[in-house]
């Protein structure tokens, strides 16, 4: 679960604009994509701390600040859960997330659960409570990957459709021979490269596809990498090795950036240093410190 968790969190950040259009097509005009997104992973962790119990199943959750074009609210919150196993407490957890987020930010919140498991009967969509006259009913958006039609996804112009196709392909593991799964995986690579998708997104989806659909047979995986190198070099002049190196660099930069953020936050809250002095001590720009300071002011409201 740890690898899939990392893959999902990365792909959601890399194609979140496409994610929004994919799930909220009729309302996409409300979102101001030019302002980008703010991923509130740390804030969500504070609202719902993860357990250190290694026996507890992991799940993917994202909380994203999305700026809007219309209405009284300048930004709203989108809570995403990617669930890949049966969980009798799932609906209650969705409700818990919702009321904690709403109470914390007092902003409009929409929630969506993406089910990536193979159990067609597992699809919790509501949470209800009734005790001695006290009642509550909570409904959230749901999307069951196994229900989707491959033909519709292949014909879609939305890059996120390739992410869903990847999950559908992974669900076939163990049900078809590895050679056939290999061919399906390669066909997705070719389909991706045929689409008019920006290069950075192509790279992100390729990495998601490469690592999400896995083979137990090392020889099959090596065969896929060789074919992938051949196809990507032919279409983009950059092979999968370069993609992986670039991804590793980005992930490394992200870790460093988070450490700097945490250090700046400590200095802002526990010292009376000026913004300029903190920037000099940490080795970041003044604007970086000011952004952290602004985020602290926002979370303290």
Image: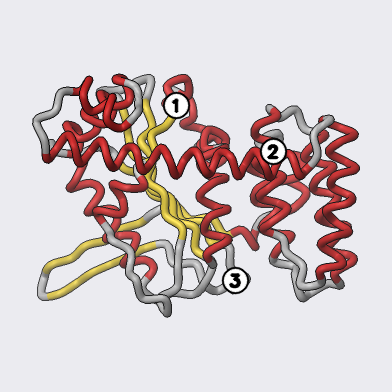
The relative height of residue 160 versus residue 146 in the rendered view (above or below) is above
Q: CA distance from mark 2 to mark 1?
A: 19 Å
Q: Where is mark 3, residue-wise?
A: 120
- Residue pictured at 57% horizontal, 35% vertical: 18
| Left or right position of 204 against 195 | left
Of circles 2 and 3, the one toward us is 2
The relative height of residue 245 versus residue 275 in the rendered view (above or below) is below
Please state the horizontal and vertical placement of residue 16, each as a whole percent of the image: 52, 37
Q: CA distance from mark 1 to mark 3?
A: 35 Å
Task: Please tell me the numbered disc located at residue 21.
Answer: none
Of circles 1 and 3, the one toward us is 1
- Residue pictured at 75% horizontal, 68% vertical: 172
| Left or right position of 229 against 242 | right
Q: Where is mark 2, residue-wise?
A: 203
Graded by Cα atoms within 10 Å as few (under 14), some (14 to 19) or many (20 or more), the crowding at tag 2 reads many
- Residue pictured at 39% horizontal, 54% vertical: 140
- Which element type, helix, strand or loop, lies under badge 3? loop
Earlier residue among tags 2 and 3: 3
Q: Where is mark 1, residue-wise?
A: 36
- Residue pictured at 81% horizontal, 55% vertical: 185
Q: CA distance from mark 2 to mark 3?
A: 31 Å
Specify the quadrant that holds the C terminus. Answer: top left
Please state the horizontal and vertical placement of residue 138, each as a whole percent of the image: 30, 58
Please state the horizontal and vertical placement of residue 188, each as a whole percent of the image: 80, 48
Of circles 2 and 1, the one toward us is 2
Looking at the picture, tell me which residue is in the foreground, 240 or 130.
Answer: 240
| Left or right position of 284 against 144 | left
């Amino acid at each position: 679960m740890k690898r899939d968790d990392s893959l999902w969190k990365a792909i959601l950040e890399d194609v979140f604009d496409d994610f929004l259009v994919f799930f909220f097509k009729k309302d996409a005009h409300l979102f101001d994509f030019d302002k980008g997104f703010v991923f509130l992973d740390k804030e969500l962790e504070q609202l719902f701390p993860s357990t250190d119990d290694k026996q507890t199943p992991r799940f993917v959750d994202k909380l994203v600040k999305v700026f809007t074009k219309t209405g009284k609210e300048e930004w709203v919150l989108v809570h995403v859960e990617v669930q890949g196993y049966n969980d009798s407490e799932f609906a209650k957890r969705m409700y818990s997330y919702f009321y904690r987020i709403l109470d914390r930010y007092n902003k409009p919140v929409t929630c969506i659960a993406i089910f990536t498991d193979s159990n067609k009967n597992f699809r919790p969509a509501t949470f209800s409570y009734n005790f001695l006259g006290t009642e509550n009913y909570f409904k959230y958006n749901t999307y069951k990957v196994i229900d989707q039609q491959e033909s519709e996804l292949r014909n879609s112009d939305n890059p996120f459709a390739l992410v869903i196709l990847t999950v559908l392909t992974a669900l076939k593991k163990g049900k078809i021979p590895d050679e056939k799964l290999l061919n399906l995986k390669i066909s997705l690579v070719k389909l991706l490269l045929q689409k008019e998708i920006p290069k950075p997104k192509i790279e992100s989806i390729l990495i998601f596809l490469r690592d999400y659909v896995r083979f137990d047979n090392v020889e099959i995986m090596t065969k896929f990498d060789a074919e992938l190198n051949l196809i990507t070099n032919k279409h983009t002049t950059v092979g999968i090795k370069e993609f992986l190196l670039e991804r590793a660099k980005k992930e490394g930069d992200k870790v460093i950036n988070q450490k700097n953020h945490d250090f700046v936050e400590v200095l802002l809250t526990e010292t009376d240093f000026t913004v300029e002095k903190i920037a000099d001590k940490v080795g970041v720009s003044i604007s970086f410190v000011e952004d952290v300071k602004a985020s602290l002011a926002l979370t303290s409201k």
